[in-house]
Image (tube, grey):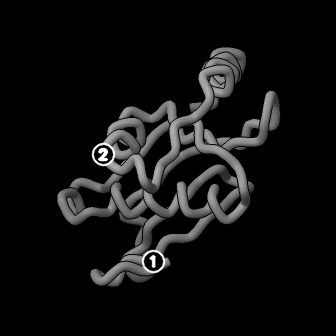
């Protein structure tokens, strides 16, 4: 994915990272994991944009792409990241709400894996 500002977004599923690049430099990222039970879902935990690149829409582009990936894969997004939660609330047409049971399972997974995020 590329936006008009020359930012390219790449998904590194193995690392649990959706990264925004300006050239070869990582300028922002969403850290996430894949939940398998009770249903498959992408679970964003943190969104980080490098200070020199804040205010350029990078975090929003990352959130949009995460939901786009989930849509293409036919899975839900269970956002635990406060930024993604706010972004989803502002874009309900692009970010369907996750089932409450899925959200609880995502929260339980994070609790069971301390230090991961």
Q: Residue at x 30, y 56 (%)?
A: 50
* Quarter of the rendering containing residue 23: bottom left
Q: Is residue 4 above or below residue 116?
A: below
Relative side of 95 to 74, left or right? left
User: Disc 2 vs disc 1: Cβ atoms closer than 8 Å?
Assistant: no
Q: Is residue 6 above or below residue 30?
A: below
Relative side of 110 to 49, left or right? right
Looking at the rendered structure, the secondary structure element under dot 1 is strand
Q: Residue at x 74, y 36 (%)?
A: 35
Q: Which quadrant of the figure contains the C terminus?
A: top right
Question: Can you identify the residue that label 1 sits on?
Answer: 8
Q: How many marks?
A: 2
Visible residue check, residue 115:
no
Q: Mark 2 vs mark 1: which is more N-terminal?
A: 1
Question: Can you identify the residue that label 2 sits on?
Answer: 90
Q: Residue at x 54, y 46 (%)?
A: 31
Place of residue 3 in the rendered image (x, y in percent of width and height, measured from the top left): 36, 79
* Quarter of the rendering containing residue 40: top right
Q: Residues within 10 Å of mark 1 (few under 14, many from 20)?
A: many
In this view, the residue in front, 27 or 42, is 42
Looking at the rendered structure, the secondary structure element under dot 2 is helix
In this view, the residue in front, 15 or 58, is 58
Q: Nearer the viewer, mark 2 or mark 1?
A: 2
Q: Residue at x 34, y 84 (%)?
A: 6
Q: Is residue 88 above or below residue 12?
A: above
Q: Is residue 113 above or below residue 59?
A: above
Relative side of 72 to 29, left or right? right
Place of residue 9 in the rendered image (x, y in percent of width and height, measured from the top left): 49, 71
Place of residue 111 in the rendered image (x, y in percent of width and height, measured from the top left): 64, 15
């Amino acid at each position: 994915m590329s936006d008009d500002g020359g930012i390219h977004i790449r998904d590194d599923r193995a690392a649990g990272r959706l990264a925004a690049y300006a050239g070869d430099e990582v300028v922002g990222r969403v850290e996430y994991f894949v939940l398998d039970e009770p249903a498959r879902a992408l679970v964003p935990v943190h969104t980080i944009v490098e200070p020199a690149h804040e205010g350029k829409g990078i975090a929003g582009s990352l959130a949009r792409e995460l939901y786009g990936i989930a849509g293409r894969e036919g899975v839900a997004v269970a956002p635990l990241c406060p930024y993604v939660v706010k972004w989803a609330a502002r874009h309900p047409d692009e970010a369907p709400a996750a089932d409450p049971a899925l959200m609880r399972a995502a929260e339980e997974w994070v609790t069971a894996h301390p230090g991961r995020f």
